[in-house]
Amino acid sequence: MQNNKLSMTDTLGLGFMTFAFFLGAGNLIFPPLAGFLAGENMSWAMIGFLLTAVTLPLITLIAVAKANGKVMGLLPPLAATMLAVAIYIIIGPAFAAPRAGLVAYEMGYKPFIENAEASFELAGVVFTSSQLFYTSIFFGIAMLLSLFPGKLLDSVGKVLTPIMIILLMGLALSVVILPGAEVAPAVGDYQANPLTKGIIEGYNTMDTLASLIFGMLIIDLLRKKGVDSPREQTKYLVRAAFIAAGGLAFVYISLFYLGATAGDLAVGADNGGVILTNYVNHQFGASGQLLLAAVVTLACLTTVVGLVSACAEYFNELMPRLSYKLLVVVMSVTCAVVANVGLAQLISISIPVLVTIYPVAIALVAVTYLTERFAQPAFAHRMVLSVALVFGIIDGLKAAGVDMSVFDVMPLSAQGMAWLLPTAITIFACLVVKRPSGEAVLN
């Protein structure tokens, strides 16, 4: 068995690669709008956002390392497969990857072209010509990078990410040195519940779901580097997780502050990408727009490469007859097609889905850490995740506009977190209820 060790440069490259995989579309478009709407309550909203967009992904990566990549190992095989497939589809071809391509188009390409709205209809679907052209090129490049997963650490971690970090640092410094306006009063849900609203907004980054996938991808990359010892894999994965978490926190705090001080630059904006674009145009003009385009394009590209690679790896293991390279091509083409649905439509469709699945992912992380403390670990995993799913569905239906007022009596239901208390009670019950003497443990 090989037991290679990574050099300091390789370890930093692994951390930068992990950061780059996470830093994509949602990480750039949601914090500025949240900061603008939270206004004077920005600090509480930011804390909530950082909980679900930084802390949870961090502890999820560590949980994946702790379980040696098998966080769903105690679930029934069919349930584990269904949950994994759902997560991979959500962060892959259905939402996260196409959204990244769309944000790269909206912020990194569209501002520089004319006649961006020229469109045509094909098979009953309306396509914007410039958008179709850009997404085809974008996902084509992502496909080429994803076809050679063994080179990901070198191409993403050591080349693309350092460039992106330098550009982000320049943007962050400008936000502090050149704030737009005074912080305004909070609006909407940020007036009464800034903390819980920030927590829910953090769902939109999809980073906790991505952590379950990226953790396994990183372990596979470490194996390709000759690091076969589970202990060494855990050590390097934890280091990479802390590097990524530090980078994400730096970006989010900067973008929250940008949104909170945007003033008139944010008037009429329906997403944070508009606020970010307006700010850069106002402060730096055309050169700033080029800088922003480079940051956004690199951020979204590296994320898509990670997502496409991870999805192709998983479905190759699930269906060995389909080669990894074929799956990369299929995933990339699917992402390009879905990306032409439109950014606003994708975001509106994804919110109910995320509100449903996030409680299950959070519960999975919690029980992974508590596995040794359960008298019946497999039973506890199944019960806790079942409860989280049931109440997550209730919250998801409510987010989709279905009348679920009968559940309004539940704590935190108004904030879209009705799942939290029942799930916590189930975890506590599984911790305190001991296995009767002589009874076999459910495995």
Image: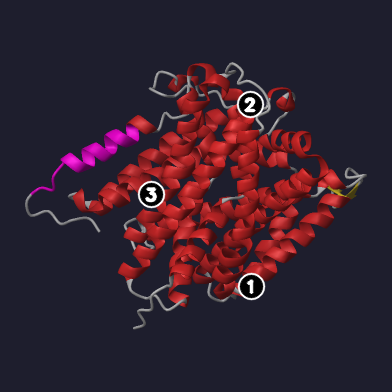
Q: Nearer the viewer, residue 255 or 369?
A: 255
Residue 36 position in % (x across, y down): 62, 26
Q: CA distance from mark 1 to mark 3?
A: 29 Å
In this rendering, position of residue 374 left or right of residue 421: left
State which mark lies toward you, 3 or 2: 2
332 lies above or below 130: below
Secondary structure found at label 3: helix
Q: Which residue has dot 3 on it?
A: 59
Q: CA distance from mark 1 to mark 2?
A: 42 Å
In this rendering, position of residue 47 left or right of residue 174: left
Amino acid at dot 3: Ile
Residue 95 appearing in the image? no
Give the numbered dot on residue 147: 1
Q: Which residue has dot 2 on it?
A: 261
Task: Please identify the quadrant where the C terminus is shown.
Answer: bottom left
Magenta-colored segment: predominant secondary structure: helix
Q: Residues within 10 Å of mark 1 (few under 14, many from 20)?
A: many
Q: Could you tell which of marks 3 and 2 lies nearer the N-terminus?
A: 3
Residue 323 position in % (x across, y down): 59, 76
Residue 289 position in % (x across, y down): 78, 44
In this rendering, position of residue 376 left or right of residue 154: left
Q: What residue is drawn where x is 58% and y is 50%?
A: 23
The part of the chain drawn in magenta is 422-436
Q: Could you tell which of marks 1 and 2 lies nearer the N-terminus?
A: 1
Amino acid at dot 1: Leu
Amino acid at dot 2: Thr
State which mark lies toward you, 1 or 3: 3
Residue 236 sits in which quadrant? Answer: bottom left
State which mark lies toward you, 1 or 2: 2
